[in-house]
Image (cartoon, rainbow, N blue to C red):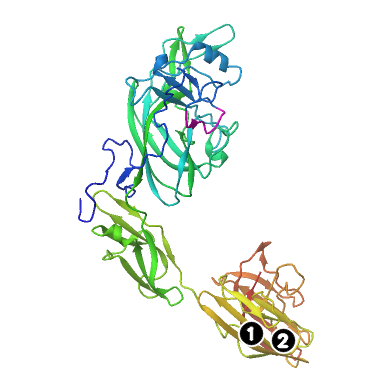
Amino acid sequence: MKKGVLIALFCGISSLVYSQDTCFRFTVRPYNIIQNPSFEREGLPCASGFINQYGLTIPYWTTATDEMLTGYLNSCNNFQIPDSIFLEAVPQNRFVFLYPIVPQPIPDGNGVVAVTDFGFDGAPYSYPKHKSYISTCLPVTLEKDSLFRIEFYVGFGQRTAKPLVTDSVRLLPEVSPSPEKFSLFGLPNCPANPLPVVGCPEVGGWVILGSVTVGGGMGSWKKANIDFRATENIQALALGPSCDTNHISSQGIYKLDDTLVQSTNYSYFLDNLKFYRANVPIPVLTISSGSLCENSITLKVTPSIFYSGFDLQWSKNGSLLSGEHGNTITITKDSYGEGSYDCRVVNDSVCLVSDPFVVSWKVGPNPIVLGSADTTACNGDTVLLNAYIDSSFKYSWQDGSQLPYFETSKTGIYTVTMTNDCGTGQSQKSVEFSECKNEVYVPNAFTPNGDGKNDIFRVRFSNPPATYRISIFNRYGQLLYSSTNYSIGWDGTVSGIAQPIDAYAYILEFKDNKNIEHTQRGTVVLIR
């Protein structure tokens, strides 16, 4: 173990079944917040049956869903549910079957729970799922972005020898195929009751925290763990088969009364849950100097006190940055530039990656955003003053309006105040309307938003042209619109599809009434 790592840290279990990620591991310490982690009924009458059935409670435990039955088996009943309880359950639930034999010895205490997996019908994460779960409310809240580990044992049972057959019921014995994928789910509050008739907790708002695939031979117990990061504050946990597991029909073929029977109904046993909390936090990237407005920033990984003695490696867009192993990295417009950055923190027992920090340079207010200081237009026309820079800005015009553009048909001086994280600035423009002596007026922007104002980009002539053609292109040079009819303008769509906010180039070609040819090029801004 490298310098700076506490030798006394509890380093977890060596016989783990599944590695979730090549860089998602951390040292942990016991965090005993799961109440009754081995499903005991101390001081209560001996019982085996189905959790939440009348008269059977497991202190601190319930089920996340109630479509499928969750079993409870106790040593006082030799880990068997009486036939009478199975027969009583059949009229209320068609998903009833005989549990396999509980492997001996059990990991801890006197009780175990049995969760079921009947595979799924339909698309993943949709109803129905036909699975059962065990769930509990926590005495404390798991804080968002904290790291935790849950450890548990999975039992793979052998099939019982005989079915349960009566005049009206035929219950078949089941088995525990290997491997099986288990998932841990979280909920930000404690539910008052199980979700009704839902086979997967995600359908009812539970969030998946992590998964692990566990394999074991029939008649054995296997230890497993799920390391996870709380994606939000969590108050309740549920554990059981993953929502995306399929039928494992090849494992369910056996002979019954000299007849081959195929089954896709399986169950597994859970026992001896343990909970841990990480000794190190998720690394976080912060700006230590500079800003996105200055096209130069220095990112720092924090809290650095936890990571002394660790190896650090910075990446951009998923690619390692050679030589960048310090607590900080400086990014400029010309060095590394825009992109998604993260930092990996690693030593012999810890490997964590920060959330990405997206570097996208911001622009400040532009005092010449309205173009030249003065413009003239024809009487009767409307001039659209376009101050749009990007969505980070807020705008305020001289009359208090807050759109990124301003429409006017009156002579005057117009001022817009622009504000974003980079500061505040103003742009001003003088507009004069008069009788047109020019042949043509081309708007510099239009707003095809259906309000009846400036919805069409159309060239206006004081005298009708002898010939006319206009062509409009996007920034990639693709022709979007072309017309030889000056009375029809462009509505901002192509084949009925609205085009995005952007600047579009145009080429205007016409002959005036003196048969003189003119060619005019420019740009028009589409604003929605």
Residue beneath the point at 65% across and 88% down: 429
Q: Looking at the picture, which amino acid does disc 2 mark? A: Val
The relative height of residue 50 versus residue 256 in the rendered view (above or below) is below
Front residue of 321 and 40: 40
Segment colored magenta: 59-67
Q: Position of residue 81 (x, y in %)?
A: 47, 16
Magenta region, main secondary structure: loop
Q: CA distance from mark 2 to mark 1?
A: 10 Å
Horizontal side of residue 108 vs 397, given as left or right: left
Front residue of 35 and 375: 35
Disc 1 target residue: 520
Disc 2 target residue: 440
Cβ atoms under marks 2 and 1 closer than 8 Å: yes
* Callout 1: SS: strand
Q: Position of residue 431 (x, y in %)?
A: 70, 89
Mark yes or no: residue 258 visible: yes
Q: Position of residue 104 (x, y in %)?
A: 33, 19
* Callout 2: SS: strand
Horizontal side of residue 441 vs 143, given as left or right: right
Q: Quadrant of residue 166?
A: top right
